[in-house]
């Protein structure tokens, strides 16, 4: 069996008497899309925040590429190859699309400590950023200020920013949140194009998106994993259907 690229071991996060992550073991293989689903309050976003380093667990470990990263900072994890998108769009709204990507790429480059060189005069950064915008379908929007982009385009720009960090794992927290149907389809199509090139941990409420994208699915309830398996196995699991999926998810 392929060695996991990312895994958690007995990961636990408490807020007083509330257990947000309950002794969680999770494994993500190289190139795999591992979806994490569950009802509101199941601890999905808390899990993503712990993987990215924004929240430290009370106990347990996070192992990335064979290294224990449990105590590493968010910035160090990003440089190691963990890139995160957020439920709420997080962009420099006054910058153009390409400037947002250049900024992320500059943060990754060896020149980030060079206070005397202007990032906006580095042609190589701009060329590479333009290529990433083309890859996510925003080539024609490169000079548009981010605040003027449609919501779906802003989410595509966030993916380009994540890719600028040269990730090995993408941590995707509700990438289709707030999107209309056509925007959601475009985002899923984009992630399908990236599938296999990057491992992904996908938190998503849209079950159509989950079952199109996921290689494996883990179901969280009150911070505990109640089922993990291939999409068809999770879809058919009576306990999962009863607890979460149900007929209203369109899976009856």
Image (cartoon, rainbow, N blue to C red):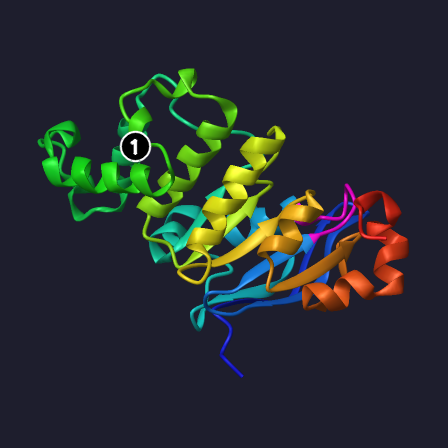
Corner quadrant of residue 66: bottom left
Considering the numbered disc 1 on the image, is that residue within a helix, a strand or a loop? helix
Q: Is residue 5 visible?
A: yes
Q: Could you tell whether 247 is left or right of 225 in the image?
A: right
Residue 241 position by quadrant? bottom right
The percent position of residue 167, horizontal first and vertical second, equals: 37, 54
Give the image location of residue 155, x and y in percent.
Answer: 48, 33
What residue appears at the point 45 percent right and 28 percent down from the top-left corner?
154
Residue at 57% in and 32% down: 182
Residue corresponding to mark 1: 139
Span highlighted in magenta in the image: 37-44
Residue at left offset 37%, top offset 52%: 76
Task: Please check the rendered image and state whether residue 40 is part of the magenta-colored stretch, yes or no.
Answer: yes
Relative horizontal placement of residue 25, taking residue 127 as reference (left or right): right
Q: Point out the residue furthest to the bottom here.
A: 1
Instruction: Please say whether residue 148 is one of the residues in the magenta stretch.
Output: no
Q: Is residue 154 above or below residue 202?
A: above
> How many residues crowd around disc 1 within 10 Å: few (fewer than 14), some, or many (20 or more)?
some
Q: Position of residue 146 (x, y in %)?
A: 38, 21
Residue 54 seen in render: no
């Amino acid at each position: 069996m392929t060695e996991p690229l990312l895994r958690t071991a007995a990961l636990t996060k408490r807020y007083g008497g509330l257990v947000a992550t309950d002794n969680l073991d999770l494994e993500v293989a190289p190139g795999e899309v591992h979806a994490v689903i569950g009802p509101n309050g199941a601890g999905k976003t808390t899990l993503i925040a712990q993987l990215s380093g924004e929240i430290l667990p009370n106990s347990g470990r996070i192992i990335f590429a064979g290294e224990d990263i449990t105590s590493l900072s968010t910035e160090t994890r990003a440089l190691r190859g963990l890139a995160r998108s957020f439920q709420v769009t997080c962009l420099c709204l006054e910058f153009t699309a390409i400037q947002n990507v250049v900024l992320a790429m500059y943060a990754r480059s060896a020149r980030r400590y060079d206070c005397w060189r202007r990032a906006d005069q580095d042609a190589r950064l701009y060329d590479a950023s333009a290529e990433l915008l083309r890859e996510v379908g925003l080539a024609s929007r490169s000079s548009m200020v981010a605040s003027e982009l449609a919501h779906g385009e802003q989410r595509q720009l966030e993916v380009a920013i994540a890719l600028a960090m040269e990730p090995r794992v993408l941590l995707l927290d509700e990438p289709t949140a707030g999107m209309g149907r056509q925007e959601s389809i475009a985002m899923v199509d984009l992630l399908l194009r990236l599938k296999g090139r990057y491992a992904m941990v996908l938190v998503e409420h849209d079950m159509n998106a989950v079952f199109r994208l996921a290689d494996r699915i883990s179901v969280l309830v009150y911070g505990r994993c109640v089922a993990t398996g291939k999409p068809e196995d999770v879809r058919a699991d009576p306990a999962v259907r009863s607890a979460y999926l149900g007929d209203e998810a369109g899976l009856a």
